[in-house]
Image: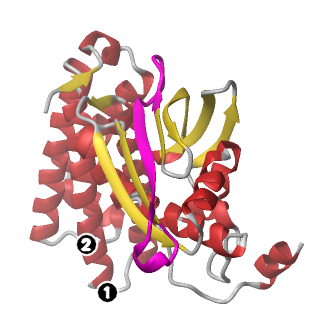
C-alpha cells in the first residue's frame, strides 16, 4: 500500500502538530530530569520500577518532540498514539494496585492522558491519508418483495433514517445527489454522488464525483430469497478511510468500526422495511444521538432525566 501524507513543510506550520511537539517536550523534560518527583506528583510513588518507567516515557516524549518540531511527519503522531496507549495501560495497572495514597492525582492523570490520547488520534488520522480503498460487504434478508425493498432504498432522502453516519442526503438531479455524513472523531464530510446503474427491483449502484472529501462507491443488490421468503439485500461499499489502516484501527478502538456500522445500518433497514420504524431500546433511547455515547456501556435502566427527555 502506498500512503500519501501532507508535505513536511505544511506540517511544520500546523498549529496542532507544533502544539503536540511542545507538549511532548514539556512532559518529557521533568520525567527525565526528576523521575521520582514526577511519579510522586502522579500519586504512584517513587519505587525504582516507577522511576524507570517515568524515565523511559520521558525519553520517548523527547524523541517525539524532536521529530514533531524538527522534521514533522505523521509517523511521529502515530508514535504518540502508541505511547499514549502504553501510558494508559500503565496508569490502569497503577489504579488496580493503588494503596490509596495520592489516588485522586492518579485518577486525574488518567483522565488527562485519555484526553491527550483523543487529541493525538485526531491529529494522526486527519494528517494521514491511505491511498488504498476499504471495501465493506454486508447482507440481510427482509420479508418484502425485491420491488418493495428497492423502492425503499431508492428514496435516497430516507437513507439517514437507518444509516447512523449520514446526516443528510439531498437529491439534486435525476441521477445526482448531495451527501453529508459524520466521519470518525467528530469530523463532517460531504460529497456529490451520481447513480451509475439503476435496475428497478434488482440493483442500485453509485459513485462519488470528483472533489469528494472521501471518495466512495458502492452497490445494493435485491435478490429473491430462497423459498420466496422475501429479499436478500446485498450491499458492497468501497471508500478511503482517513488514516488508512491505522485510521481504521484507531476508529475501531474508539467504537466506530466501519464493518459494524454497516451491519447496524442493515439491521435498521430491516426494521424499517418490516415494521415501518427503527426500534429504540432503553439502552439507546436517543437513536442516532447514541453515536456520542462511544465507547458503549452495558444496557441499563434510564435515569429520571433521560426518561423525561425520551418521553418528551
The secondary element bearing badge 1 is classed as loop
> Picture quarter containing residue 256?
bottom left
Task: Assign the C terminus to one quadrant of the image.
Answer: bottom right
Residue 119: image x %, image y %? Answer: 42, 44
In the visual, does 74 lie left or right of 196?
left
Query: x, y (%) of residue 204?
Result: 50, 43
Please name the residue shown 45% across and 17% down the image: 210
Q: Which quadrant, please, contains the N terminus?
A: top left
Mark yes or no: residue 155 visible.
Answer: yes
Q: How far apart are the two marked residues, 1 and 2, measured between alpha carbons?
A: 10 Å
Looking at the image, residue 52 lies above or below residue 127: below
Q: Residue at coordinates 44% horizontally, 22% vertically from top-left?
A: 15
The residue closer to the viewer here, 59 or 290, is: 290
Give me the disc on residue 191.
Answer: none
Front-lying residue, 67 or 147: 147
- Asked if disc 1 and disc 2 are in contact, CB closer than 8 Å, the reply is yes
Q: Which residues are magenta?
A: 207-231
Dividing the picture into quarters, in which one does residue 180 lie? top right
Relative side of 268 to 97, left or right: right
Question: Is 177 placed above or below 27 here?
Answer: above
Single out the residue that lies furthest toward the top.
9
Task: Please check the rendered image and state whether residue 223 is part of the magenta-colored stretch, yes or no.
Answer: yes
Residue that extends furthest to the bottom in the rendered view of this protein: 301
Residue extending farthest to the right is 312
Asked if residue 181 lies in the magenta stretch, the reply is no
Q: Secondary structure at mark 2?
A: loop
Q: Is residue 29 visible?
A: no
Density class for disc 1 (Cα within 10 Å; few <14, some 14-19, many ≥20) is: few
The x and y percentages for residue 293 are: 57, 65
Residue occupied by mark 1: 99
Instruction: Identify residue for label 2.
Output: 45
Amino acid at each position: 500500500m502506498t500512503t500519501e501524507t501532507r508535505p513536511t513543510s505544511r506540517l511544520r506550520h500546523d498549529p496542532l502538530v507544533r502544539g503536540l511537539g511542545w507538549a511532548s517536550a514539556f512532559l518529557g523534560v521533568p520525567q527525565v530530569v526528576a523521575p521520582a518527583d514526577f511519579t510522586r506528583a502522579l500519586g504512584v510513588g517513587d519505587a525504582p520500577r516507577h522511576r524507570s518507567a517515568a524515565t523511559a516515557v520521558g525519553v520517548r516524549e523527547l524523541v517525539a518532540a524532536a521529530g514533531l518540531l524538527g522534521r514533522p511527519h505523521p509517523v511521529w503522531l502515530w508514535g504518540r498514539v502508541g505511547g499514549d496507549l502504553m501510558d494508559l495501560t500503565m496508569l490502569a495497572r497503577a489504579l488496580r494496585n493503588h494503596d490509596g495514597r495520592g489516588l485522586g492525582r492518579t485518577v486525574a492523570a488518567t483522565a488527562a492522558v485519555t484526553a491527550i490520547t483523543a487529541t493525538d488520534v485526531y491529529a494522526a488520522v486527519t494528517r494521514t491519508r491511505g491511498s488504498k480503498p476499504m471495501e465493506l460487504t454486508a447482507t440481510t434478508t427482509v420479508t418484502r418483495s425485491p420491488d418493495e425493498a428497492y423502492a425503499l432504498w431508492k428514496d435516497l432522502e430516507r437513507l439517514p433514517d437507518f444509516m447512523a453516519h449520514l446526516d443528510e442526503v439531498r437529491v439534486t438531479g435525476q441521477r445526482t445527489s448531495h451527501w453529508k455524513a459524520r466521519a470518525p472523531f467528530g469530523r463532517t464530510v460531504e460529497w456529490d454522488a451520481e447513480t451509475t446503474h439503476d435496475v428497478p427491483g434488482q440493483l442500485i449502484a453509485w459513485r462519488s464525483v470528483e472533489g469528494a472529501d472521501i471518495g466512495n462507491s458502492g452497490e445494493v443488490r435485491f435478490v429473491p430469497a430462497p423459498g420466496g421468503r422475501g429479499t436478500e439485500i446485498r450491499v458492497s461499499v468501497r471508500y478511503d478511510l482517513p488514516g488508512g489502516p491505522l485510521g481504521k484501527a484507531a476508529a475501531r478502538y474508539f467504537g466506530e468500526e466501519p464493518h459494524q456500522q454497516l451491519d447496524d445500518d442493515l439491521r435498521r433497514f430491516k426494521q424499517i422495511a418490516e415494521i415501518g420504524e427503527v426500534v429504540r431500546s432503553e439502552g439507546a433511547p436517543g437513536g442516532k444521538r447514541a453515536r456520542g455515547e462511544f465507547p458503549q456501556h452495558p444496557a441499563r435502566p434510564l435515569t429520571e432525566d433521560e426518561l423525561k427527555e425520551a418521553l418528551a
